[in-house]
Image: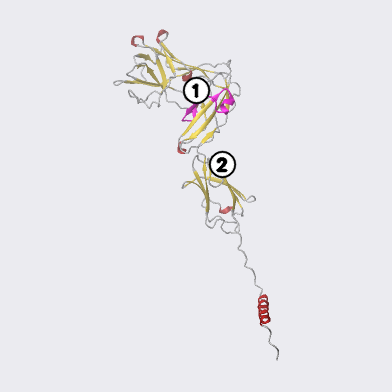
């Protein structure tokens, strides 16, 4: 009978047996789950970006192969709020790039949503976005200044040329504009030039531009709803030279006029009376006048009846609205706008001559842009003048005589 092993040896053998038994079983380590590949690498404009230019396209770069046939108007949406926005798109399979072209460009000051449904598929038939996917961005709330009028660098421009720029639509919020203008480009660029505040996308000068000089101008826009401010580039134009040849004058016949007091209304009558107790309106036919003219001078002549004249100064002002048929009341509407376009006093043979830079500039803007509300006569508190508007013996009476400059060959309007 063999001797018993010591206790410590018995325990050691037990541990060794246990270890040996454990080593005889080969266990496999658990496999890590596959890493999910994001289907989109990047988007432009970036997600949640702001102040996005309105001329931007939307670009989505994919990390997977997409079945182009599943990119449809029912699987891909471009939205403004909850309204679907029209678009076209291009798909590059080699670059895995989707480019969305918003129809007519993006709207200013709005939040856009690009949304993909789960029906957009990979080329293997599985869904690109099993739960759908979308991202958003917000456009700049001021329309970028891209199209100045006159064009940047234009030459041989009228000495009364009005300035126009891209105006932001009212839906984006109230946008105010600051116009900077000078013959020194550095002053305009640094915003140290004289400036004027405006609420619309046009400015009509009240004095003529210097002839044969280059003027520089720029616009700052400020959206009062969003607080965004946008600075425009510096543009320039050059006016006609001092010795520019003049064209023969054009005559614009009167279209209609009206005069009313509290008790008497007359429309297209041979005369009208300007007094503290009357309201008077006149406008001219301008359809046949080309909008590329360069006005040198405007003359408007009417005849006053000396027997019915007290006081002499009569001013011509722009009306706050066009004349609708013969709808004129005393004391208004229509009402004269602030600012005198021209002032006339009685001259020889009872004729009144209206001539002024502001009148010429206002008329040229009307001819170029196809707008304008007409004009109103305003007298002083003691002025009463009976004017003759139409007289067969004086064919030029009541008409605008417009003297223009000849454009050079190839000049831009």
Question: Could you say which quadrant of the image residue 312 lies in?
Answer: top left
CA gap, disc 2 to disc 1? 34 Å
Position of the N terminus by quadrant: bottom right
Spot occupied by residue 169 in the image (x, y as percentages of width and height): 47, 36
Circle 1 residues within 10 Å: few <14, some 14–19, many ≥20 = some
Q: Name the residue nearer the viewer: 176 or 13.
A: 13
Which residue was labeled with disc 1? 205
Compared to residue 164, the image places residue 301 above or below, namely: above
Q: Is residue 360 left or right of residue 327?
A: right
Q: Which callout, 2 or 1, points at the residue further toward the start of the chain?
A: 2
Q: Name the residue nearer the viewer: 246 or 117.
A: 117
Spot occupied by residue 76 in the image (x, y as percentages of width and height): 53, 51
Circle 2 residues within 10 Å: few <14, some 14–19, many ≥20 = some
Is residue 99 in the magenta section? no
Which residue was labeled with disc 2? 56
- View extreme (top): residue: 348
Position of the C terminus by quadrant: top right
Spot occupied by residue 158 in the image (x, y as percentages of width and height): 54, 21
Q: Name the residue nearer the viewer: 116 or 189.
A: 189
- View extreme (right): residue: 2
For residue 176, say whether it is visible.
yes
Spot occupied by residue 325 in the image (x, y as percentages of width and height): 37, 26
Q: Is residue 393 left or right of residue 17?
A: left
Compared to residue 276, the image places residue 178 above or below, namely: below
Question: Could you say which quadrant of the image residue 278 lies in?
Answer: top left
Compared to residue 67, the image places residue 10 above or below, namely: below
Is residue 200 in the magenta section? yes
Instruction: Tell me the element at label 1.
Output: loop
Q: Which residues are magenta?
A: 181-205
**Residue at horizontal 42 percent and vertical 9 percent from the top:** 347
Instruction: Tell me the element at label 2.
Output: loop
For residue 394, say whether it is visible.
no
């Amino acid at each position: 009978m063999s001797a018993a092993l010591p206790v410590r040896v018995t325990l050691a053998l037990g541990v060794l047996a246990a270890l040996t038994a454990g080593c005889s079983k080969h266990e496999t380590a658990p496999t890590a789950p596959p890493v999910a590949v994001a289907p989109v690498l990047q988007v432009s404009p970036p997600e949640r970006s702001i102040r996005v230019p309105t001329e931007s396209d939307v670009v989505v770069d994919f990390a997977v192969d997409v079945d182009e046939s599943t990119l449809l108007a029912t699987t891909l949406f471009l939205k403004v709020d909850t309204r679907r926005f029209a678009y076209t798109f291009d798909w590059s399979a080699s670059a895995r790039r989707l480019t969305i072209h918003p129809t007519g460009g993006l709207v200013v000051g709005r939040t856009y949503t690009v949304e993909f449904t789960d029906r957009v598929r990979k080329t293997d038939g599985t869904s690109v976005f099993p739960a759908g996917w979308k991202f958003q961005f917000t456009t700049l709330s001021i329309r970028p200044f891209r199209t100045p009028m006159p064009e940047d660098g234009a030459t041989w421009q009228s000495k009364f040329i009005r300035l126009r720029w891209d105006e932001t639509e009212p839906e984006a919020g109230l946008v105010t504009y600051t116009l900077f203008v000078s013959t020194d480009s550095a002053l305009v660029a640094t915003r140290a030039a004289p400036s004027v505040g405006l609420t619309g996308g046009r400015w009509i000068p009240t004095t003529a531009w210097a002839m044969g000089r280059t003027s520089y101008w720029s616009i700052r826009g400020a959206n009062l709803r969003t607080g965004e401010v946008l600075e425009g580039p510096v543009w320039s134009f050059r006016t006609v030279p001092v010795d520019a040849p003049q064209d023969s004058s054009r005559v614009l016949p009167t279209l209609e006029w009206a005069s009313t007091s509290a008790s008497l209304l007359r429309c297209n009558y041979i005369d009208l009376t300007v007094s503290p107790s009357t309201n008077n309106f006149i406008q001219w036919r301008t359809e046949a006048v080309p909008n590329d003219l360069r006005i040198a001078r405007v003359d408007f002549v009417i005849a006053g009846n000396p027997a019915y004249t007290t006081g002499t100064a009569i001013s011509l002002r722009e009306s706050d609205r066009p004349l609708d048929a013969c709808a004129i009341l005393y004391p208004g509407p229509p009402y004269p706008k602030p600012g005198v376009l021209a002032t006339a006093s009685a001259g020889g043979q009872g004729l009144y001559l209206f001539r002024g830079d502001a009148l010429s500039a206002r008329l040229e803007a009307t001819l170029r842009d196809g707008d304008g509300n007409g004009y109103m006569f305003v007298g002083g508190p003691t002025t009463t003048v009976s004017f003759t508007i139409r007289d067969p013996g004086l064919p030029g009476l009541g008409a605008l005589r417009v003297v223009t400059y000849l454009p050079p060959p190839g000049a831009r309007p």
